[in-house]
């Protein structure tokens, strides 16, 4: 099971790293004035989510399940809280992936005179992406419990 734990930790690191890149991309996007620059950043965010982040989340969940049921680990209360927090963070992040991909498709199909960030649809999608940040505290709690639990 040591290899499963290694893959689990690697998947979580990839997930958190790609989520951090997403935050940076969104901050840069808000300051980018050119439509071409905005399209590039929106597309890059979608690619990162599809190719790195979503697979990392699924792999972290899968390996976490393997560790729970086949790792011979007791289920103390803290581990249950960690699992619930991780599931909440994963759900928020997977929903974010859905919205990011939806925004990318919309932006590529939008008429050239439509503002990607200021139009009603651009604002709606951006707000939905921002709202998924509500999963961050759950991820932090799950990580903190994991660090304490692994001591």
Image: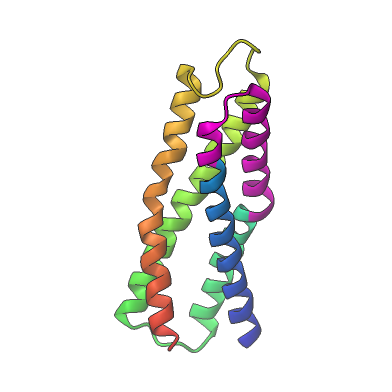
Residue 84 visible in the snapshot:
no
Expressed as whole percent of the image width and height from the top left, the position of residue 125 reads: 48, 30
User: On the rendered structure, is 32 left or right of 91?
Assistant: right
User: On the rendered structure, is 48 left or right of 119?
Assistant: right
Residue that appears at 57% across and 60% down: 17
The vertical placement of 149 against 9, above or below, is below
Residue 42 quadrant: top right
Expressed as whole percent of the image width and height from the top left, the position of residue 120 reads: 45, 18
Task: Judge whether residue 50 is colored magenta.
Answer: yes
Q: Which residues are magenta?
A: 26-52
Secondary structure mostly seen in magenta is helix
Quadrant where the C terminus is found in the figure: bottom left
80 vs 149, nearest the viewer: 149
Residue that appears at 60% across and 53% down: 54
Residue that appears at 52% across and 72% down: 65
Residue 46 visible in the snapshot:
yes
Task: Judge whether residue 83 is colored magenta.
Answer: no
Residue that appears at 63% across and 41% down: 46
Expressed as whole percent of the image width and height from the top left, the position of residue 104 reads: 62, 31
Expressed as whole percent of the image width and height from the top left, the position of residue 126 reads: 47, 32
The vertical placement of 28 against 84, above or below, is above
């Amino acid at each position: 099971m040591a290899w499963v734990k290694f893959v689990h930790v690697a998947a979580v690191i990839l997930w958190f790293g790609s989520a951090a890149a997403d935050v940076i991309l969104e901050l840069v996007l808000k300051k980018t004035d050119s439509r071409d620059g905005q399209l590039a950043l929106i597309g890059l965010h979608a690619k990162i989510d599809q190719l790195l982040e979503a697979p990392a989340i699924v792999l972290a969940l899968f390996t976490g399940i393997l560790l729970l049921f086949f790792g011979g680990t007791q289920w103390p209360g803290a581990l249950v809280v960690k699992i619930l927090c991780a599931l909440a963070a994963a759900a928020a992040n997977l929903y974010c992936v859905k919205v990011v991909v939806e925004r990318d498709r919309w932006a590529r199909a939008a008429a050239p005179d439509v503002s990607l960030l200021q139009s009603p649809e651009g604002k709606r999608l951006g707000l939905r992406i921002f709202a998924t940040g509500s999963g961050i505290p759950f991820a932090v709690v799950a990580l903190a419990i994991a660090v304490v639990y692994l001591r």
